Amino acid sequence: MYSVNNLIRMFSSVRQSVIGLDSESYSVIFANPAARTAFGFDPTGSSAKEIISCDILEENSADYLCGTTILGRKASISVVKETGLTLLFIDFLSDDKPTLGISRHMISSLRNSAMGIKMSADRCFSILEDGQLPSEKHVSVLYHYYYSLLRTLIQIDSADLIERGELPFSPASVDLVKLCSNVTNTVVTLCAETGVNISFTANKNELITVVDPARIEQLLLNLFANSLQHTVSGDSVTLSLNFTGSRIIISLDDDGEGIPPESISDIFKLPDDSDEKALKRKGNGLGLFIALGIAQQHKGVLLVESRESKGTCVRIMLPVDEDTVQRFNSPETTYRHDDASFVLMELADVLPSASYGPKYED
């Protein structure tokens, strides 16, 4: 066990909030000055369970990152476990509204999609002028650029609404097993050419609960898109749904390239042009930020465990409120899984152009 004196010597001058816990009792044995200032009190001697979700504290992994709410404030926590000691490195996310800016990376993405639409449209028009019809390939490329443009715009809008606390939320009685299965099946169909093995498992055949199905679909597709950006043919991506009686655990595991250690602490933050690493990342940097916002909208916790070159696991832990489920005694909401256009938009950064075209528009 590390002595408190050792913790004081190592972390008292650190500007980030750091607290140390006894791994068995979850009692707070150390809080640096930054943590005491951020909390507004000294938590030393109290139970960490009074401050932080048990889902975070009881996670078995040795080190991981999670997004949650602490004392009513959004926060990102990096958890490191040693023998008898758990260290929590806490970053409170800004409460200022709005904070979303349009980064150079987003502008580049929008510009590339707009230029792609223009070039594809010019090509199709040139073919028409020659008295021929554009090929399916040319039309597919045009549609692909359109969906790429739409995805960036929708993600910027969603991130902005999350920052403002205005993301639409329409809870309904939903079979979560069916919803997850339908989303996975659609992704499997559309991503067949990637060669990535995509699957879904659940420990129940049916799980009726109260969620916003549109938001959960958006969350799942953001996670799938993130994994597919970091996997190649032959890799695996597995969505799993487990019900423990008191909580619902949605997990997405992949065995792709993983997240570099120097980047993982920033994955819940909005893109910042001052960070050169952010400009080199795949995608627009909003996917996990949006996923965290949706998890928190459902009063849940999002955990990320990643090893570079070995893969990433993202877990969303949602509480189960039986009283709420009973109040929503209306028939189960039908999930609109036949509409592939939303999936095509969310996966625009990972699907080939051949996956697009008028065939999915009806």
Image (tube, rainbow, N blue to C red):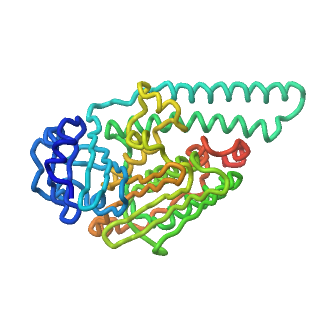
Task: Report the side of 134 relative to 16 (left or right).
Answer: right
Judging depth in this view, the residue of 257 and 226 nearest the camera is 257
Image spot of residue 353 (x, y percent): 71, 41
Image spot of residue 348 (x, y percent): 61, 42
Task: Report the side of 219 relative to 295 (left or right).
Answer: right
Query: On the image, which quarter does residue 181 sit in?
Result: bottom right
Judging depth in this view, the residue of 339 and 29 nearest the camera is 29
Task: Report the side of 297 relative to 179 (left or right).
Answer: left
| In the rendered image, the vertical position of residue 330 relative to residue 271, given as above or below | below
Image spot of residue 191 (x, y percent): 65, 53
| In the rendered image, the vertical position of residue 201 relative to residue 273, given as above or below | below
Image spot of residue 358 (x, y percent): 71, 44
Instruction: Kindly identify the residue that appears in the image at 50 percent across and 48 percent down.
Output: 308
Instruction: Kindly identify the residue that appears in the image at 57 percent across and 30 percent down.
Output: 109
Task: Report the side of 127 relative to 16 (left or right).
Answer: right
Instruction: Kindly identify the residue that appears in the image at 24 percent across and 61 percent down.
Output: 84
Q: Quadrant of the N terminus?
A: bottom left
Is residue 25 visible in the rendered image? The answer is yes
| In the rendered image, the vertical position of residue 289 relative to residue 120, given as above or below | below
Query: On the image, which quarter does residue 333 sit in?
Result: bottom left
Tell how many labels. Answer: 0
